[in-house]
Amino acid sequence: MYIYYIGIGSNLGDREGYLAFAVSELTNTDGVCSVSHSSWIETPPWGPVEQGPFLNGILKVESTLTPLVMLDTLLHIERLAGRQREIHWGPRTLDLDIILAFDEAGSMISICAETLTIPHPYFWDRTFVLEPLHELLPTFTYKGISISERLATLSLA
């Protein structure tokens, strides 16, 4: 069994509807045992592209799916939601990213492959990821720094 923390966001159309769609699709996926989520938070967009605000959160997913199969599942759900990858960091109906993954023993999984990097390479620098992650995983520590400390540091920047 794996535990995944998945970043979820939308800034086009019915943002809350797209997030609910993703939760429903994951919940009904073979190999997914449970899906829970943080509160949704509205945040400004990340990156250089002019666009509207995002509705973001974190999903906690318990699953037997391996990380690469989970990635394929998330990409499929994005496509079902009409996601088009035309502009890097551009507007999107649905964005699903594996942020963290833990194995059966509770050890954090580290993957650096062409199609998948876990932990997500930018998660530790993004408050829109860390705030909802903190809600679901308040005792998380990364490289010797607690998530609470990291959020405090980022708020001063």
Image (tube, rainbow, N blue to C red):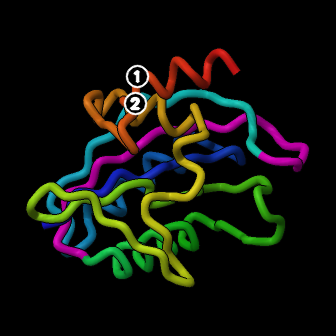
Question: Is residue 105 located in the magenta-colored stretch of the structure?
Answer: no
Q: Quadrant of residue 14?
A: top right
The tag on residue 124 is none
Q: Residue furthest left?
A: 105
Q: Residue at x 57, y 46 (%)?
A: 9
| Of residues 28 and 130, the one drawn nearer to the viewer in this rendering | 130
Q: CA distance from mark 2 to mark 1?
A: 4 Å
Classed neighbour count for the residue bearing mark 1: other residues with Cα under 10 Å, few (<14), some (14–19), many (≥20): some
Q: Residue furthest front?
A: 144
Q: Decide if residue 12 is on the left or right side of residue 60.
A: right
| Of residues 24 and 88, the one drawn nearer to the viewer in this rendering | 88
Up-down relation of residue 121 to residue 149 (above or below): below
* Quadrant holding the C terminus: top right
Give the x, y percent position of residue 47: 80, 47
Give the x, y percent position of residue 75: 51, 73
Q: Decide if residue 71 is on the left or right side of residue 10.
A: left
Secondary structure type for disc 1: helix
Q: Decide if residue 72 is on the left or right side of residue 33.
A: right
Q: Quadrant of residue 71?
A: bottom left
Cβ–Cβ below 8 Å for labels 2 and 1? Answer: yes
Q: Residue at x 88, y 48 (%)?
A: 48
| Of residues 29 and 37, the one drawn nearer to the viewer in this rendering | 37
Magenta stretch in the rendered image? 47-65
Up-down relation of residue 53 to residue 70 (above or below): above
* Quadrant holding the N terminus: bottom left
Q: Which residue is mark 1?
A: 148
- Which three-letter amino acid code belongs to the residue tagged 1? Ser
Give the x, y percent position of residue 77: 48, 69
Q: Residue at x 60, y 40 (%)?
A: 125
Q: Residue at x 18, y 64 (%)?
A: 103
Classed neighbour count for the residue bearing mark 2: other residues with Cα under 10 Å, few (<14), some (14–19), many (≥20): many
Q: Which residue is mark 2?
A: 147
